[in-house]
Image (cartoon, rainbow, N blue to C red):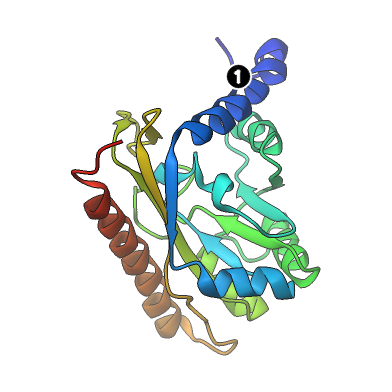
Amino acid sequence: MRLNNRFILAAAPYLVGSFVKLLGRTIRFSQRGFEEIELRWKEGLPSIFALWHQRLLMMPLAYRGSGLHVLISNHRDGELIARAVSHLGVHSIRGSATRGGSAGFRKMVETLKAGGDVAITPDGPRGPARKAHKGAVALARATGYPIFPTTYACSRRKEFNSWDRFVVPAPFSRGIFVCGSPLIVPEKADDTEMERYRLALERGLNEITEQAEKDMRGCSA
């Protein structure tokens, strides 16, 4: 069934949003590393969040700021995703993070400068999985705001056979949200430095994801 079917576009986002909320209520989530970002939320300071596409589903439940905007590309199922996240209180920005002159990139800059937070999946929308593109570090350089690597893991989950190995937690499992150390990209960073920051973001995301998985191994619900 095609994703541009009007019934699917009307019903599926509501069902997905409701599913995430209900699933989240069954999972005992803890948090680690959110102290700095919570201070920024209290002070109204904008931030950039980076997370792997694989870990997208539950991350809106960890957000406690005043307004989260997530970049959603213009690929074929983008409209469905945009409508689904709206039911979780998340605003969408349509476009690309990898092309500095794109409308999506400009909108992210405007959102941050207006005080909103922005989330990017740096390996989306088509991968390679857990390999960061340059969009997040380009945004950090353009705005001066820090990137916070974020992830989650659960004691029991279903991993799908998709390009990103998308994760859906099992009901009544235990989980953890993790926020890593912020990455600040200098305004005058050249191409060589930008590649170093891109690799640092990729490494940081993989490290916190692997540690979160290790922490959840063997945990009982």
Does 215 sit left or right of 134 as displayed?
A: left
Q: Does residue 133 appear anywhere in the picture? A: no
Q: Quadrant of the C terminus?
A: top left
State the image coordinates of residue 44 (x, y, percent, origin top left). Answer: 74, 72
Check disc 1 and report the residue beneath it. Answer: 3
Q: Amino acid at mark 1?
A: Leu
State the image coordinates of residue 22 (x, y, percent, origin top left). Answer: 55, 28
Q: Is residue 68 above or below residue 41?
A: above
Quadrant in the picture for residue 203: bottom left
Q: Quadrant of the N terminus?
A: top right
Q: Is residue 136 above or below residue 166?
A: below
Total marks in image: 1
Secondary structure at numbered mark 1: loop
Judge by depth and name the residue closer to the eye, 5 or 52: 52
Q: Is residue 145 above or below residue 59?
A: below
Does 17 sit left or right of 50 as displayed?
A: right
Quadrant in the picture for residue 150: bottom left
Q: Residue at x 39, y 30 (%)?
A: 172
Q: Residue at x 51, y 36 (%)?
A: 24
Q: Residue at x 47, y 47 (%)?
A: 124
Does 141 sit left or right of 42 as displayed?
A: left
Judge by depth and name the residue closer to the eye, 75 or 145: 145
Does 208 sit left or right of 218 as displayed?
A: right
Judge by depth and name the residue closer to the eye, 163 or 86: 86
State the image coordinates of residue 153 (x, y, percent, origin top left). Answer: 35, 47
- Residue at the bottom extreme? 188
